[in-house]
Amino acid sequence: MEPGDALDRIAAALERLAPSPPPPTDWRAAPAYLWEGERARAVPVLDALPLDSLHGIAAQKVALRNNCARLASGAAAHDALLWGARGMGKSALVRAAVAAVQAEQPGALALVQLAPGTLPTFPALIAALTEEPRASLLFIDDLGFGADGRAEMLALRSLLDGGIAPRPAHIRLAVTANRRAIIESEDTSGAMHERDERDDALALADRFGLSLGFHPADKDTYLAILVGYTAPLGLSFDPEEAMAFALTRGNRSGRTALQFATELAGRAGISL
């Protein structure tokens, strides 16, 4: 056997053993996608509550839904930053707003969530979506701050407003962050590294045209949110028990209200 023939046979055998490359992503086939760093995984059903089911954030709902509708229709739209108290519906609102617009404008808008740790591959995602006619809202959930998240925050800041290649107008971002004081400019910190972190956060926040704050719910708002979940089910509740439930979880929020409504529905043998 000639050496060249042996090499050809080895190469052919290796090709047979190697897995087939994944098919290219069809960016028009699904309502949502999960970007995993090198490829996107289609999500055939977007997990989203109806907008009407989100309570206590009326102004935020209108602002984000309208921004998503403009993006889907080809009009100018903002990158959006949703910041503030945990459990008040930031992530749920992103999904619900996109789902509402998808119902009104079928096929016009996709939600693409970046999996944790994939921010360095952001340029590759932009490149993949640039030639697609469908509008995309890129979703970064729970952006980190402080020492652990500073590198990620700086990278995102550069990508938003520091690159030489323009980002197409049909690709916009929605970012959520639990840092309540992300857009407050007053410097109350003493240590230099704390001031640097605050300056970094402010510099990032400045790059979002739409900034929506989510604040802890007071007692009346918490109970009103709970009514919004329970009334359509024909359920009633004891306000004192509802407040005690919130106390055991350490906060009054939309998430806590939903958890208590789930408890009530379970007791009644019905589904939310």
Image: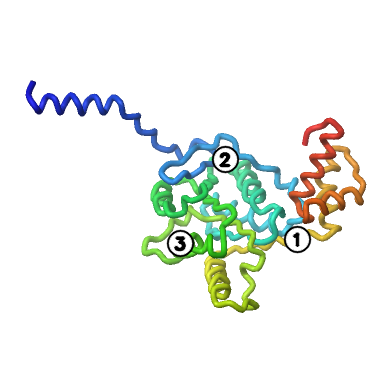
Instruction: From the viewer's side, name the closer residue of 6 and 209.
Output: 6
Q: Which residue is mark 3?
A: 155
Instruction: From the viewer's side, name the closer residue of 43 and 202.
Output: 202
Whole-angstrom CA distance, mark 3 to mark 2, is: 33 Å
Q: Is residue 167 left or right of residue 269?
A: left
The image quarter containing residue 12 is top left
Q: Residue furthest left?
A: 2
The residue at 87%/33% (across/down) is: 268
The residue at 61%/47% (across/down) is: 98
Mark 3–mark 1 CB contact (< 8 Å):
no
Q: Of the residues shown, which amino acid type is indicated by label 1?
A: Pro
Q: Is residue 244 left or right of residue 166?
A: right
Instruction: From the viewer's side, name the closer residue of 74 and 253.
Output: 253
Residue 106 numbered tag: 2
* N-terminal-most mark, 3 or 2: 2
Q: Of the residues shown, which amino acid type is indicated by label 3?
A: Ala
Q: Is residue 33 left or right of residue 11?
A: right
The image quarter containing residue 177 is bottom right
Instruction: Please provide percent x and percent y for residue 147.
Output: 53, 64
Instruction: Please provide percent x and percent y for residue 153.
Output: 51, 62
The residue at 52%/49% (across/down) is: 116
Whole-angstrom CA distance, mark 3 to mark 1, is: 29 Å
Q: Of the residues shown, which amino acid type is indicated by label 2?
A: Pro
Q: Which residue is mark 1?
A: 216
Q: Which color mode does the image show?
A: rainbow
